[in-house]
Image (cartoon, rainbow, N blue to C red):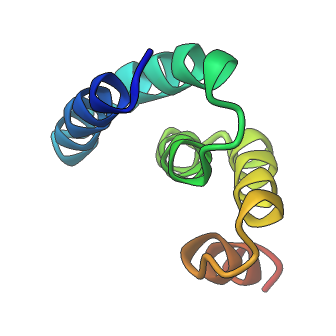
């Protein structure tokens, strides 16, 4: 999948996330991450989706992966702090 294709897929994922179709986002990001395991955005939105459906353990795992890929990314760090309160 080239960069244009992944960007189009990300646009769809964002729309589905906005419409609270979290299971779609989880399934789609799982599929895309097989070929793009270093995409911190995909890990982050997958974590947000897991969090939204109440699956905190998988959400935390996704946030940690996003941070490992891109230590400068802030949102997953903020969410992890909230989980530890």
User: The C terminus appears in which quarter of the rendering?
Assistant: bottom right
Above or below residue 21? Residue 49 is below
54, 39: nearer the viewer: 39
Closest to the observer, 37 or 62 = 37
* Residue 61 placement (x, y as % from top left): 81, 47
Q: What residue do we see at 48% from left, 42% from top?
A: 49
Question: Left or right: 62 with respect to 7?
Answer: right
In percent of width and height, residue 20 lies at 25, 39
**Is the N terminus in the top left, top right, bottom left or bottom right quadrant?**
top left
- On screen, residue 41 above or below 26: below
Q: Position of residue 38 (x, y in %)?
A: 70, 42
* Residue 19, quarter of picture: top left
Left or right: residue 26 versus residue 5 is right
| Residue at the spot 75% in from the left edge and 39% down from the top edge | 58
Can you say whether 15 is above or below 4 in the image? below
Name the residue rendered at 70%, 67% in the picture. Answer: 70
Residue 84 image position (x, y, % from top left): 83, 79
Residue at point 83%, 61% (across, down): 68
Total number of numbered labels?
0
Residue 35 against residue 40 in the figure, above or below: above
Q: Nearer the viewer, residue 4 or 69?
A: 4
């Amino acid at each position: 999948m080239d960069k244009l294709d992944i960007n189009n897929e990300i646009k769809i994922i964002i729309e589905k996330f906005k419409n609270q179709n979290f299971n779609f986002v989880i399934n789609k990001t799982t599929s895309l991450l097989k070929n793009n395991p270093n995409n911190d955005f995909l890990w982050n939105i997958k974590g947000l989706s897991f969090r939204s459906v109440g699956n905190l353990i998988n959400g935390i795992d996704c946030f940690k992966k996003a941070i490992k890929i891109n230590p400068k990314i802030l949102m997953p760090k903020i969410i992890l702090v909230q989980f530890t309160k």
